[in-house]
């Protein structure tokens, strides 16, 4: 099992990327991830690639449907070349409202569209690598024109791993069928991963003559820890509020239904519509909190992660900010413990 770290992308984040990436590599993190919420997911990785040598660099995730496959293909190609083969391309669909109303892009048949998107990326990359013709024709995407003036040409590491993110089984099956990785949402439980995600990935893999071992599962983990009881109690309530927010989203209902908590999800959705946040938090029981988080003292977090995820998830990151120079002893010990798995 590998321990990764997420790059903070709040505020004026770009000036801090080089320092953060170098610190993460020096501590021994396996990978460094960017997300795409308030800022672009790819720009920070250019700086991270420039200032590191070995740590893997990935998007967790970049939004696919807000861009043409050609745009992603060019960006990923350049990053893969610049990082000397360290890119892990993670893609997500987002949801209909954001694609249509925030990005003003089309939304329909997301699983079928994303399958074609992945195939389009590979077709474009093949044309780049071989300087050959471009012939991608599908229901959603068509790329049939590339001339030498617009073709960046071959690179040393042309095989770019693609991972996708999802919650429901359709995207998990697609990951098994077409991808090298799958990002499990932080809002998850081991039972959900075991009973829903992994069987769906295995089913998709079988369709393509592959196995689930060909797909690397990654996730971020809600953790509750602290230097004393008061700090742990405070973190516990922060996580309870975070879980209430995620659990109110109908898309994530499958996680709750795995445990028989679907009715609670419906209640949370209704409360969210009326912005009754304190009442939402009160619905997250200690039982739910235990299932959806890992709670342990700082010195036990690594062992707790190994116990919870060995054989289930291949690489994890903590749903915690990483500050270079802060808690280095904790991070170093935790990395050592987790990388033993």
Image (cartoon, grey):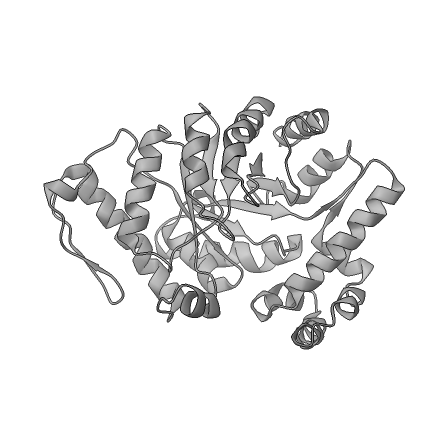
Taking the image as shown, residue 186 lies to the left or right of residue 225, namely left
Name the residue at 69% across, 65% down. Answer: 259
Q: Position of residue 174 (x, y in %)?
A: 41, 58
Q: Is residue 111 visible?
A: yes
The residue at the far right in this view is 229
Q: Position of residue 62 (x, y in %)?
A: 43, 50
Query: Total number of numbered labels?
Result: 0
The image quadrant that residue 273 belongs to is: bottom right
Taking the image as shown, residue 337 lies to the left or right of residue 23, namely right
Name the residue at 55% across, 39% down. Answer: 7
Q: Is residue 217 above or below residue 94?
A: above
**Residue nearest the observer in this picture, 174 or 282:** 282
**Residue nearest the observer in this picture, 162 or 60:** 60
Q: Position of residue 56 (x, y in %)?
A: 46, 32
Q: Position of residue 126 (x, y in %)?
A: 21, 43
Q: Quadrant of the C terminus?
A: top right
């Amino acid at each position: 099992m590998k321990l990764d770290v997420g790059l903070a992308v709040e505020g004026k984040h770009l000036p801090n990327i080089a320092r953060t990436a170098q610190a993460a590599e020096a501590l021994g993190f396996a990978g460094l991830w960017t997300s795409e919420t308030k800022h672009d997911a790819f720009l920070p990785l250019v700086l991270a690639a420039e200032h590191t040598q070995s740590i893997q660099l990935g998007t967790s995730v970049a939004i696919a449907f807000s861009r043409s496959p050609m745009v992603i293909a060019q960006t990923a190609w350049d990053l893969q070349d610049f990082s000397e083969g360290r890119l892990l391309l993670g893609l997500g669909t987002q949801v209909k409202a954001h694609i249509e109303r925030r990005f003003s892009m089309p939304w329909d048949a997301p699983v079928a569209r994303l399958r074609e998107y992945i195939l389009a990326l590979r077709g474009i990359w093949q044309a780049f690598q071989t300087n050959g013709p471009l012939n991608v024709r599908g229901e959603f995407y068509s790329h049939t024109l590339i001339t030498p003036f617009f073709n960046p040409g071959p690179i040393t590491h042309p095989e770019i791993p693609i991972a996708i993110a999802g919650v429901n089984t359709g995207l998990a099956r697609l990951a098994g069928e077409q991808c090298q990785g799958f990002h499990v949402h932080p809002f998850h439980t081991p039972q959900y991963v075991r009973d829903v995600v992994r069987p769906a990935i295995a089913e998709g893999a079988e369709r393509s003559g592959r196995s689930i071992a060909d797909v690397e599962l990654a996730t971020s983990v809600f953790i509750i820890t602290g230097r004393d009881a008061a700090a742990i109690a405070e973190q516990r309530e922060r996580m309870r509020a975070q879980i209430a927010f995620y659990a109110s989203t109908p898309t994530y209902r499958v996680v709750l239904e795995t445990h028989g908590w679907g009715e609670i999800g419906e209640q949370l959705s209704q409360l969210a519509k009326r912005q009754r946040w304190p009442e939402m938090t009160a619905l997250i029981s200690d039982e739910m909190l235990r299932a959806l988080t890992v709670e342990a003292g700082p010195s036990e977090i690594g062992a707790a992660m190994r116990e919870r995820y060995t054989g289930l998830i291949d690489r994890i990151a903590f749903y915690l900010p990483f500050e270079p120079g802060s808690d280095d002893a904790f991070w170093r010990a935790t990395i050592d413990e987790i990388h033993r798995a």
